[in-house]
Structure formats: C-alpha cells, structure tokens
Amino acid sequence: MQFEDMKTFWDEQNSELLFAIDKTALQKQIEGDTRKTYRRIFIRDTTEVGACFLLAGIYGYKAISVLLESGSHWIETSRYIISIALALFVASTFIIGRRRQTKKEAQFDNTILGELNRMLSQTGYQVWLLKSVFWWYLLPLGTAALLTIQLQFDIINFVISSKEPIEATPFWGYAIMIGIMYSLIYWLNQRAIRKQLLPQQKAYESLKQKLLDAEE
Amino acid sequence: MSTKAGQKQIFDEWLSLHKGLLFKVVRSYARSIHDQDDLFQEIGLKLWHSIPKFKGEAAVTTWIYRVALNAAISWSRKEHSRKNHTESFKVSESILRSQPVKKNERVEWLYERIGKLDALDRSICLLMLDGFSYKEISDTLGISEGNVGVKVHRIKSDLIEQSKGGIE
C-alpha cells in the first residue's frame, strides 16, 4: 500500500467524531488547575522567600532590642546584622535566580524543539539550585543559626511557653544538631538530583538529540 | 468584552473548529479512555494558556498542533515517570464522552502503528498524514526542512513496509 492510500483513509475519520466534549467540565477543570497552579506558586514563594524575610525581620527586631536595652553591645548587635544579611542573601538568590530563569524561558519559541529546550533549561536550573544548595542556602542559614544561638533558645522557650527557660545546650551540641539537620536536607536534595532530575534531563536530551539527528 | 470573556470565546471557537485535530493527537498518544481524557485535559489547559500568546504569525491549525503536540510529548514523559514511580491516579471529572461510531479498521490499524512510534516520530507522522508541508512540519518542530525530509522518508518507508503484511 502506498502512503497516499493511508492518507486517504486517515482523512475518512474527519467526518466521524469519536468523542463529545463536555465543555462545562473542561472549563471548570481549566479554572481549577489554573487556581491550583497560582496557589502552589504562592505557597512555594511564601515558604521560601517569605521565611527568609521573616527571619531577617526577627533578627532586625532583636538587633534593635539589644541596642536599646544594653546600649553599645556591638558584638551581639553585629551578629544579628550579619544574620540579616545572610537571610537576605538567601532570599535574593531565590528571587534573582527565578527572575533570570523566567526571562531565559521566555526566549524559547513554542516549537517542539523550543519546548524541549525550555524543559532542559528548567531542569538544568533545578539541578544547579539543588547541587549548590550548600553554598547559597545551608551555609548562610546555618551560620546565621549559630550566630544567633541565644535567640533560638528564646524562640523555643516562647513556643513551648516554658516558665523556666530551658537549660542552654552547649554550643557544640547545638552545632552538631544543626549539622545533622542540614546534612539530612543536603542528602535529600542530592537524592532528588540523582533519582528525578538527572534521568529527566537525560530523557529530554535524548529526545532533542533524536530531533536533531539529521540536522545539517 | 473582558479579556477572559474574549479568551473563552476564542477557546470555544478553537475547540469547535479543531476538535478533530485534538482527538487525533489524543488517540495517537494515549490508549485507554482514562489516559485519553487525562491528556485531553492537559492539552485543553495548555491551549487555554496559549491564547494570549497567539499573535497570528502562524496559521491557527499550526499553532494548535504545536501546543497539542508539545503537551502530548510532555504528558508522555510524565506518564512514563508516573508509571515508573507508581504514583496515585489523578481523579477528576471526565471531559470526553465516547460517541457510538462504527470503528474504521484501517484507521485503527494506522493508530496502532503510530502508537508504536516514539513520541517525536508520532508527531511527525500525524503532521504528515494531515497533509502538512515540509516547511510547516519544520516550523512546528523547530528543525530544518532537510532534517524533516529525512525523518518523513524513514517513517513513510516503515509504514509502507508494515502495510505489506496486510491491514488487519
């Protein structure tokens, strides 16, 4: 059989529609999905960036309180100021990184190759973000947590509403606790790269390779 | 007319005029009715969000094909990874209702063959069968016409070769 014959019977189906569309349900689904996407982005941004701004605010409040209470306690004040800078550094890494990525993704056209490039760029950005999580997230926030150790105890006391302040854990004990927690976060991030992102990236790359295999 | 009302009007128009094209994509990339429904929703969502970006530089059919094929290729990837990770099924209202149409054996045979191609070749095969020119296929895929020619030739030869065994 020739290809033209296949085309002829392929065209026969144009007159017979196998499905009917429930337009109301589809519209409802689209609106629901769009709302869900916006909500997911809002929650993600609030938890990532908002948490850093909240921390910076708490550190700022504490720095002013220390200054007002005890005058020229510059060592303690400077710890809070450094911590503010570190929290803002993390927030700005999130914001600048995402803006750059959005700009980059907008350059891709809506051809299949463009879409593959967009997905590759998106996955590449995620891989970079998680691979370097120690430098832009764990190290700055871990340092801030260690610099403001007294504040952490105050917060714990406030949260558990203890009348008697909890006994101060030795600095090294606290540092080990932070180290274990952050190592776990680091391990989870690297695992996500290995198990999800790299296989995804490989699949997109092989699709792109296949698309371009006979390109001059 | 508000932007959303305008968008809805265009969307309804595209759905009414080009639903045949969308069904072809859906049937080529998904087998079960559940999957076809899921993919159709995905395409509908992408199509809805593509309306503000449509500036009329490409023909509407080409634009809709691009959006639908991109959604289908991306859906196939997700579907593959979902099956690998045995995620739970998304439960949602059905959008597609099967119509009582007598099945065309030859068309079914073609869909079966298309279903055996990989995600990219399926898109080329669909465009070929719908009579798109090399230039239009190359614009949809984002690759050169020469490359399209090589791929089209290979897919055509494969289909012709397979048809020699007879169409069941």
Image: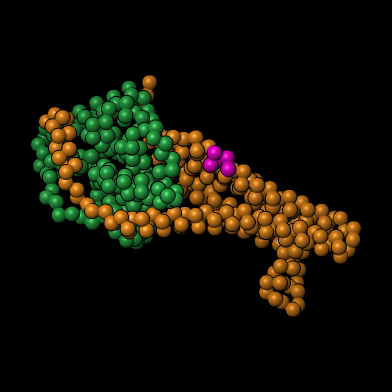
Range shown magenta: A99-103
Residue at x 65% of width, y 47% of height:
A92
Residue at the spot 75% in from the left edge and 77% down from the top edge:
A164
Q: Which quarter of the picture shows residue B136?
A: top left
Would residue B161 be found to the left or right of residue B77 on screen? Answer: left
Q: Magenta stretch containing residue B126, yes or no? A: no
Which quarter of the rendered picture does the N terminus of chain A lie within?
top left
Q: Nearer the viewer, residue A150 or A12?
A: A12
Indicate left or right for A76 with B156 as reference. Answer: right
How far across and down, in percent of the image, does residue A95 sit?
A: 61, 47
Q: Is residue B126 above or below residue A159?
A: above
Residue A57 screen position, x and y as percent: 72, 58
Q: Name the residue at 70% across, 69% down.
A: A156
Q: Is residue A101 magenta?
A: yes
Q: Colour of chain B?
A: green
Judged from this view, the residue extending furthest toward the top is A216
Above or below, A121 against A72 in this view is: above
Can residue B77 be seen by looking at this rendering?
no
| Above or below for A198 versus A47 | above
The single residue placed furthest to the bottom in the displayed view is A163
Residue A131: percent from the left, percent from the top?
57, 44
Predominant SS of the magenta segment: helix
Q: Which chain is orange?
A: A
Q: With B74 as the anchor, is A38 left or right in this view?
A: right
The quadrant of the image that shows the C terminus of chain A is: top left
Residue displayed at 25% across by 37% down: B126
